[in-house]
Amino acid sequence: MTPSKNKLKTCPNGHQFYKSSDCPVCPICEDAKKPVTGFFSQISAPARHALENNGISTQKNFQLSANLKLLNFMAWAQMQSVNLFLF
């Protein structure tokens, strides 16, 4: 028996599931989309969705993005240290 606050929902693929939130994500469809092997199989669905929404869909893209962010931070930090000497 399910708690009364859970609502029975049906996804476009016909899967039925109970959810208490308005989140439209079907857990059955999400399980089917999860990679079996590789980098993305080791992270949670919300983290995977965040990466995919930012154009990161492979481990190579993730590494390039992380390296770029690190380089940007290092450049910013270097500028901050230069500003400390100027003022």
Image (tube, rainbow, N blue to C red):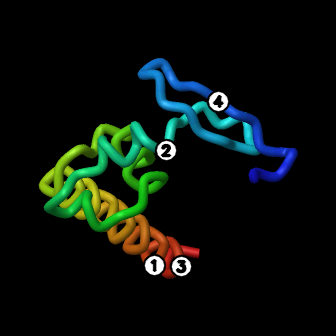
Q: Amino acid at mark 1?
A: Ser
Q: Which residue is mark 2?
A: 27
Q: Which residue is mark 1?
A: 81
Q: Which residue is mark 3?
A: 84
Q: CA distance from mark 2 to mark 3?
A: 52 Å
Question: Is tag 4's residue or tag 1's residue first in the polypeptide sequence?
Answer: 4
Q: CA distance from mark 4 to mark 2?
A: 11 Å
Residue occupying image coordinates x 39% and y 66%: 73
Q: Point out residue 15 in the picture as x, y percentages from the top left corner.
A: 48, 30
Within 10 angstroms of label 4, few (less than 14), some, or many (20 or more) residues? some
Tell me if label 4 and label 2 are in contact, CB under 8 Å: no
Within 10 angstroms of label 2, few (less than 14), some, or many (20 or more) residues? some
Left or right: 37 as drawn, with respect to 57:
left
Tell me if label 1 and label 3 are in contact, CB under 8 Å: yes
Observer-side mark, 2 or 3, equals 2
Q: Amino acid at mark 4?
A: Lys
Residue occupying image coordinates x 42% and y 73%: 77
Image quarter for residue 17?
Answer: top right
Q: Which mark is residue 9?
A: 4
Question: Is tag 4's residue or tag 3's residue first in the polypeptide sequence?
Answer: 4
Observer-side mark, 4 or 1, equals 4
